[in-house]
Amino acid sequence: MELLRGALGVGGDQALEVATAHAMLRRISAGEAGAALRIYRPEARVVAFGRRDSLLPGFPDAVAAARDAGFTPVLRAPGGRAVAYTENSLVVDHAGPDPGRLAGLEERFVGYAELWSEVLAQHGIDAQVGAVPGEYCPGAHSVNARGQVKLVGTAQRMVRGAWLFSAVAILDDADVLRPLLTEVYRALDLPFDDDSVGSIADEAPGRSLDGFEDSVIAAYDQRCGLDPAALPEELLTRAKALAEDHRVIA
């Protein structure tokens, strides 16, 4: 499976970053490519809203809160509610072919949550799978520390013939995310408790974030077999065509 590593660095366009995951899904669905894993640290602070968020009356106020805090709002490719992350986060998009409609949905949620919890445990974190009370983008397959703070959120999207599994790990900056998410979720009128926001740096002080990223890649390599590759030009071209679907216009 191809490993695509690193942010795009194309003017810091975060809509293009999330559109790349969408483009991966589309290429596989069309039979143009096989499974791929993309892993990167964003080059800007981002609030990635779900499509359902955009339908809520408070969405314009949530977008304004994100921008006022210096975060770029985008519409994410997979499902779920709003998530926020900074340059000290790790985004992992894994796309693959689907032999049958909705095949493997639950198995992926369970299997990759276990992968993330195992990686966190390697770094001395009491990692558990499951939602914590009041977490952002709540889900049964979030990965938390001590049953108290969310560290990794996961989400999926499926189309005919392909699936996308995305994860966001908060490496650091929980103190920045808590007030921002409080304002965003207040505007959306959705439940949220800022005590649920954690980071890997808080749970394992002094650990190398670069080392953690290497551990994630090693875990996926052991499970899937990875071949490092450059971002295909045709993937970037498709992502550019999809970027406007993920951009939030003021």
Image (spheres, rainbow, N blue to C red):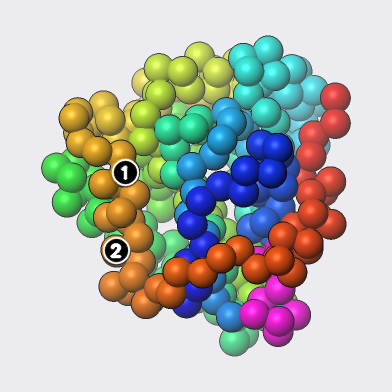
For the residues labelled 1 and 2, the Cα–Cα distance comes to 12 Å
Snapshot quadrant of residue 26: bottom right
What predominant SS class does the magenta segment belong to? helix
Tag 1: Cα neighbours inside 10 Å, few (<14), some, or many (≥20)? few
**Residue pictured at 35% horizontal, 60% vertical:** 217
Q: Which sits in the foreground, 170 or 190? A: 170
Q: Amino acid at mark 1?
A: Asp
Is residue 106 depicted above or below 170 in this figure? below
Task: Determine which residue is flagged by label 2.
Answer: 218
The residue tagged 1 is 210
Is 3 left, or right, of 9 in this rendering? left
Left/right placement of residue 98 relative to residue 243 reads left
**Crowding at label 2, few (<14), some or many (≥20) Cα neighbours within 10 Å?**
some
Q: Residue at x 73, y 24 (%)?
A: 63
Residues shaded magenta: 23-33
**Quadrant housing the C terminus:** top right
Q: Quadrant of residue 74?
A: top right
Which circle's residue, 1 or 2, is located before the other in the chain?
1
